[in-house]
Image (cartoon, rainbow, N blue to C red):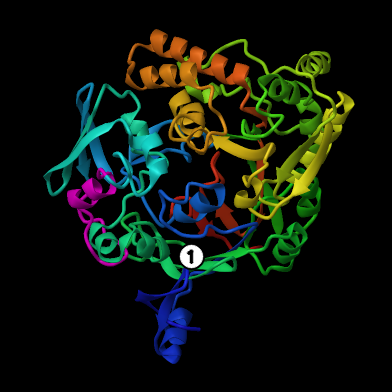
Amino acid sequence: MTLLNRRHFMQGAVAVPLVLNTDFAFAQASADKRPPLVVAVAGLPATLEPARELSNVGTRVTYSMFDTLIRRDFLGTPDGGGSELKPHLATSWERKSPKELIVTLRPGVKFHNGDEMTADDVVYTFRDGRLRGAKPEIPEGRAYFGTLDTVEAIDKYTVRFTTKAPDVLLEQRLASWASWIVNKRHYESVGIDGFSRAPVGTGPYKLARMVANDFIALDAFDDYWMGKPSARSVTFRAIPELAARVAGLISGEYDLITNIPPDQISLLEGQKDVEARSVVLANVHLLTFDELGPLTKDKRIRQALSLSIDRRKLVDTLWLGKAVIPDSHNYPEYGQMFLEGRKIAFDPAKARALLKEAGYAGEPVVYRTMPNYYTNALDAAQIIVEMWKEVGINASVQVVENFNQMRAAGQQVGNNSNSTRLPDPLGALWVSWGPDSEFQKKKNWTTTTAFNEAGRALEAETDPAKRKELFKTMLDAWDDEAPGAILYRPLEIYGVKKSVKWRPTTFYFMDLRPDNLRFDQLP
């Protein structure tokens, strides 16, 4: 066993720790009676800059390395939905006006490098040039924090956030994706690329070692402000093959595994020491239709592709009826913003009529998918292609290795997932498909005027009735243009040792803080 120094040197694309006295390291580890936690995952993020890695595989790891000012209370709700907010790195916050929020920080919080978190770190995290501005280092940040005008330190533990227009969601934004607080001194020293490989946060676990496409090893940060972490270390291992993950869990090699399809539940439940734990995600799996494609540039073809999909059959066949078909990009967690009465249509006859109207003559339609990134992705693709054939579409599946290959020239149909990052349309539909999304920036979706105008107005609107009407305009535009086709909200299933007391949330976040992770001895 090796003792890993906090300082790292860079070697290629990974952070390699310095190795110190191994005998001393072994003795120190032996004295720590806390168990390690080994998590087998289907894939790993390429880097660990939390706002840069807003993917399923990225947020799963970084969620326990970084903290937000405000915390969504996933543990306080029976379904793990997390719509309520509670203090975290901030002890309190107060609206001074519709455009001004004063946040009071928790004193004494330490970063992994020993620095105390102060207002300077918060201002640096949200600075113009990182998450917002004309050319931010992390362009995805604009979708979350483009509403900010200024962020300034009032004193060591007080920060003023001012928005360009009234923003009813600012508190939710500070508890959501891309808002994890980074260490200013370290970030300035190593730059964004260096930080991406050797990050410093305030979370319960800190980076020990990272080997691309193999594993990410974290050590407990015993100065964590919420208390000493329950595990002495956490290792995320990339095990793309489902059978290998399941076998490793049953044999005891892994403590927790991800991306389990429903047909494996009975196998896990038949074991003495392991079980399945699941939650319906605040997320949808969906298809994406590229307007740059020779066929999918025609809205009628895109509409026909969506109308031909029997989502109920997909849910019953692949998810044992336990996934949820949403009412378009429209979710109950939106509360008063939820639009009643909307449904996703399944209408093969209308699909055939649209294909005829568009002059479709049997040209090939290729559906690209990765086999393991999304649970049941390949099985879903194969079933959907057969549904398309039933209405006369000459469709086939092409398996690719990564998103770059999926989105390479000639793409017609791909797949993706959209999460409801805020309990509001601005946190799902707007983030995923708005002007700062990849779909618009890369011209995969171009007929967006009505959608964008309504979304920009929604960002500044405070009247609930007007906000709801603007959302309806956005959703009408998205449904009509059909740049994608929602399939279902998936059931995320984890295989877990019974001795590991841990609860999943409705996001891919893997919360390993002391209040959501402990270990019991098996009887």
Is residue 113 part of the magenta span, yes or no? yes
> Height in image: 75 above or below 348?
below
Q: Give the side of residue 160 with respect to residue 298, left or right.
A: left
Judge by depth and name the residue closer to the eye, 48 or 510. 48
Residue at x 37% of width, y 56% of height:
203
- Above or below, 312 against 34 in this view is above
Q: Position of residue 303 (x, y in %)?
A: 70, 21
Q: Position of residue 511 (x, y in %)?
A: 48, 50
Which type of secondary structure does the marked residue at label 1 adopt?
loop
- Whether residue 504 is visible to the viewer of this picture, yes or no, is yes
Name the image quarter holding residue 388: top right
Q: Nearer the viewer, residue 218 or 135?
A: 135
Residue 77 visible? The answer is: no
Residue 265 lies in the magenta stretch: no
Question: At label 1, which amino acid type do we have?
Answer: Ala
The 10 Å Cα crowd at callout 1, few under 14, some 14 to 19, many 20 or more, is: many
Q: Which residues are magenta?
A: 106-128
> Main SS of the magenta segment?
loop
Query: What residue did someone put label 1 on?
Result: 231
Residue 384 found in image quarter: top right
* The C terminus sits in image quarter: bottom right
Residue 103: image location, x then y, percent:
21, 38
On the image, the x and y values in percent for residue 5 come to 36, 78
Residue depicted at 41% across the width and 57% down the height: 65
| In this picture, residue 380 sits left or right of residue 454 | right
